[in-house]
Image (cartoon, helix red, strand yellow):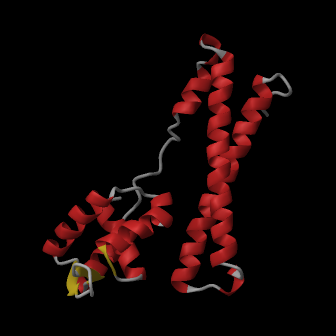
Amino acid sequence: MALEHALLVSLTERAGSGYELARRFDKSIGFFWSATHQQIYRVLRRMEESGWVSGEAVVQSGRPDKKVYTVSASGRAELARWIAEPAEDIGPLRSELGVKIRAAAHGDPAALRAEVVRHRDAHAQRLEVYRLIEKKDFPDPHRLSGTALHQYLVLRGGIRVEAGFSEWCDEVLAALDGQTTAP
């Protein structure tokens, strides 16, 4: 997936300036696709040159004007074409932590254990953030449709991934501690 497609998705949900898009990325799409603020601005210019988005200057009192972007018809066509295209990310799980666990017999068990704990805690924190978003933004998921339903489904995928990774780390820690063996 190109950053262009992630930006098109965000802009179809709500028009916005480069700054607003960067903030949205930090709070939503950025959980699944990361980009720096500089990348976002650079790609927005390229998308505007390609005709996928149009930018309109908005005068602000006491601050510099901002450019608010909306998706054009050709941008919507590109998004539809991309959605229909097979995803390239079906492949093996790549995990540096997994390779480290495979090599555990050749390293410091305490250091590996600490690394697994660090990963588990990071995934547990992200899981908590996702669950808070779910509770705040989607209190009644059975009534969702359209864009809100699609946002919720992606969030649920993130919740399941983070929960699964946290559980796997607990399983690894238990096995490393000799409490149980992996199933």
Q: In this view, does 48 lie to the left or right of 158?
A: left
- The image shows residue 41 at horizontal and vertical percentages of 25, 65
Q: In this view, does 109 lie above or below 67?
A: above
- Count how many numbered circles sit on residues in the image: 0
The residue at the far front in this view is 62
Please name whichever residue, 84 or 63, is drawn nearer the observer in this view of the structure: 63
Rendering quarter of residue 5? bottom left
Q: Is residue 134 above or below residue 91?
A: below
Residue at 26% across, 78% down: 75
- The image shows residue 62 at horizontal and vertical percentages of 26, 83
Residue at 64% across, 23% down: 112
Please name whichever residue, 153 or 119, is drawn nearer the observer in this view of the structure: 119
The residue at the far left in this view is 49
Instruction: Locate the C terminus by quadrant.
Output: top right
Please name whichever residue, 160 or 125, is drawn nearer the observer in this view of the structure: 125
Rendering quarter of residue 167? top right
Instruction: Locate the N terminus by quadrant.
Output: bottom left
- The image shows residue 9 at horizontal and vertical percentages of 39, 74
Residue 110 visible in this rendered orientation of the protein: yes
Residue at 53% across, 41% down: 93
Residue 161 visible in this rendered orientation of the protein: no
Q: In this view, does 107 lie above or below 32?
A: above
The residue at the far right in this view is 179
- The image shows residue 90 at horizontal and vertical percentages of 47, 51
Q: In this view, does 164 lie to the left or right of 154?
A: right
Q: Is residue 90 above or below residue 180?
A: below
